[in-house]
Amino acid sequence: MYAVVGCTDCANVWLVHDLRSNETANCPRCGRTHQTAKLNAFYTSEDREEAREARAALLARKRGESEAFAKVAHVADLERAVEDAGIDDREYLEASGLDADAVFEAGATATGGGSPSRSRDEIVRDAVRETEEPTEAAIVAYATDHGVPKKAARDLLMKLTRRGELSESGGRYRVL
């Protein structure tokens, strides 16, 4: 069960998985610890995508953008639009006068051996799945051992939690 909940301190809205099975949940924005029994669930669903859609609609309404949000069929459409906006890496590198293939090959070699490697996001998610005690310190240590700078690993952990892809409870993280 996924629930859309809000922080009483900073008004952040995020997703929590299994709201009633955890005693506490931390706000991904301000870090305040909330007792899950006292959190008000604005929306609940068995389907994660449905809960994400409800959260997006709530945020749009909160910002006075309900009309614009109604024009979009699904949150995934917005994500695709963001991905499609601007120019891609190859186009940017070539416009800068660089050989994009050489840059990509150098990047792959530098991160572990000539073939495309996992993204930093994937490494942080894998750290959450594979560490015995998925605490921030253990996750950051795993990520740094796999080529992610310490600050970037911490930032990604916070970003993935804020986006609802990870959850944190009692100092332990898990992939949703």
Image: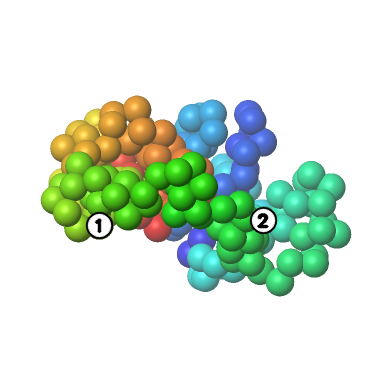
Considering depth in this image, is 130 or 72 the residue closer to the camera? 72
Considering depth in this image, is 46 or 116 the residue closer to the camera? 116
Name the spot of residue 164 as percent of width and height, x first: 49, 51
- Helix, strand or loop for disc 2: helix
The residue lying at 52 percent from left, 36 percent from top is 27
Name the spot of residue 50 as percent of width and height, x first: 59, 68
Does residue 155 appear to the left or right of 171 in the view shown?
right
Q: Quadrant of the C terminus?
A: bottom left
Marks 2 and 1 sit apart, C-alpha to C-alpha, by 33 Å
Q: Which comes before the other along the chain, label 2 or label 1?
A: 2
Residue 78 visible in the picture:
yes
Does residue 115 appear to the left or right of 93 in the view shown?
left
The residue lying at 55 percent from left, 67 percent from top is 49
Which label is found at residue 116?
1
- Three-letter amino acid code at the position of disc 2: Ala
- Three-letter amino acid code at the position of disc 1: Pro
Name the spot of residue 167 as percent of width and height, x first: 41, 48
| Marker count (numbered) | 2
Q: Please rate how many residues cluster around mark 2, counting C-alpha atoms within 10 Å: few if below 14, some from 14 to 19, many from 20.
A: some
Considering depth in this image, is 33 or 53 the residue closer to the camera? 53
Does residue 119 appear to the left or right of 17 in the view shown?
left
Name the spot of residue 46 as percent of width and height, x first: 51, 70
From the image, tell me which residue sits under label 2.
56
- Helix, strand or loop for disc 1: loop
Which label is found at residue 163?
none
Say if 120 sits above or below 114 in the image. Answer: above
